[in-house]
Amino acid sequence: MLVVGVVACQEETPTGLGDEVSGAPITIEVELPWSEFASNLEVFGGYGLPSEVGDGIIATNLAGLNARTLVRFGSYPDRATVRDSSGTNRTDSTLAIFEGLFVAHFDAAASTNTGPVTLSLGALQTEWHAGSAGWTLAVDTLNDSRAWPDSGAGPVTPLRTAAWDPASADSVLFFLDSAQIAAWADTTDQSRGARLELVTEGERLRMSSASLRLSARPSIDPDTVVELVVPSRSVTFVYDPRPGPPAAGVRVGGAPSWRSVLDIALPTTLTGPPAFCAAVGCPHTLQAGEISFGALVLTSEASDTAFQPRDSLSVDVRPVLQRAAMPKAPLGSSLIGTPLGRRVAGAAFGSQPGARFEVPITSFLRALVVGQDESGRVAPNTLAILSAIEPSTITFASFVGPGATGEPVLRLVLTIGPPVELP
């Protein structure tokens, strides 16, 4: 056990130990190594589906990773407001669509490329299910399982290629002729959809949205061109290979998402080191009210190259209510107390590993000491470290595991009053 600092407090003014005033409470900061407070670290995967992310991921041979984004559009607008020859606005329900654009918007901060890349757009030929499609299976539901003829959502009918340069635009446009527009208009065709892939190797892109911009001529005024916008109805991505669990360490996030679970056991008495005992006396029985602040401190390490985040990730910590039911155990409320968890810069898991990340768990620790939570139930002793939104991105956060330099530690700030002597 390492005592980081010991001070006495009187009238909110800290003084050194040698200047203590009798009767003043003492504030002590302690860091416990993994072996003194935690055990049974496990990493579980499989939470959520790529289709739940809402964005697309596209990659070609990024440290072995290949990912393609699939998009399906809904019904086209069947009418538009047009001004006739007399200047009156009228609704025209007879529109002749003659061409269009597939528009893909990208998140430059979440993409790896800093220069131009080339993308390819193709039309899917196989019936597929947007919620369950993967790299090898086009449909993977409870009562139906069908493979793609070609792994990776193939084959496709090639449509167009286009370049995206993040320095000049946030989107890329693919021209579509009337035949392709007509093919995607049939909402009963379960094979309809687009596949977007990266021709340029060694990069990973995040597509934030996609839409169709259709050009149509109204019957009221054929010399006028109106633009119809069709947002995507379904966006998902398929990728290969799927990462396996880490050999050691803590992992959070990904799609499907990962959770790391550990058991916590606070010592009931503190017996050192000498500076601590000199300040408060040993052995000292730990009381819940003495825990002014408690936090799990994690140290970041680089994630697998293909899954290193470019933008920040959101990490949450929740109590596990039934440890034996893992990986499907119910979880308690967030201990961080914000709906989006705590943000961690993406560089901490790539180019700048070794960052210390502090997760407050004060209420959880106090309940452990008391033996029950605020509702009077037996206090859980297991924590889950997870993404605040599961899943939110293909990338994941990695932290050093037990037994290595930078292993998880428990930081405690204790406020201990003097012993009460009865007359």
Image: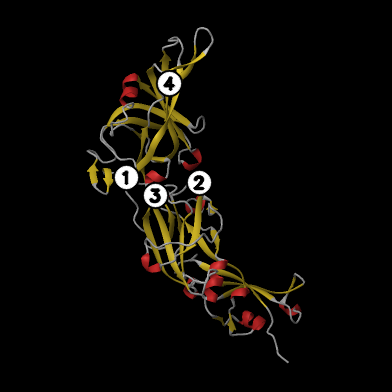
Image height of 319 relative to 125, above or below: below
**In the picture, residue 74 is in which quadrant?**
top left
Q: Quadrant of residue 24?
A: bottom right
Residue 10 x %, y %:
76, 74
> Mark 1: which amino acid?
Ser
Q: Which residue has dot 2 on it?
A: 311
Report the Cα–Cα distance between label 4 and label 1: 33 Å
Of labels 2 and 3, the one closer to you: 3
Name of the residue lying farthest toward the top: 85
Q: Where does label 4 land, which residue?
A: 79
- Three-letter amino acid code at disc 4? Arg
Q: Are marks 4 and 1 in contact (CB under 8 Å)?
A: no
Neighbours of disc 4 within 10 Å: few (<14), some (14-19), many (20+): few
Label 1 to label 3, Cα distance in Å?
13 Å
Above-or-below relation of 338 to 129:
below
The residue at the point 56 percent across, 67 percent down is 363
Q: Secondary structure at mark 2?
A: loop
Kindly state the secondary structure of the residue where label 1 is placed: loop
| Residue matched to label 3 | 255
- The disc, 4 or 1, on the residue closer to the chain's N-terminal end is 4
Tag 3's secondary structure?
loop
Q: Are marks 2 and 3 in contact (CB under 8 Å)?
A: no
Tell us which disc is closer to us: 4 or 2: 4
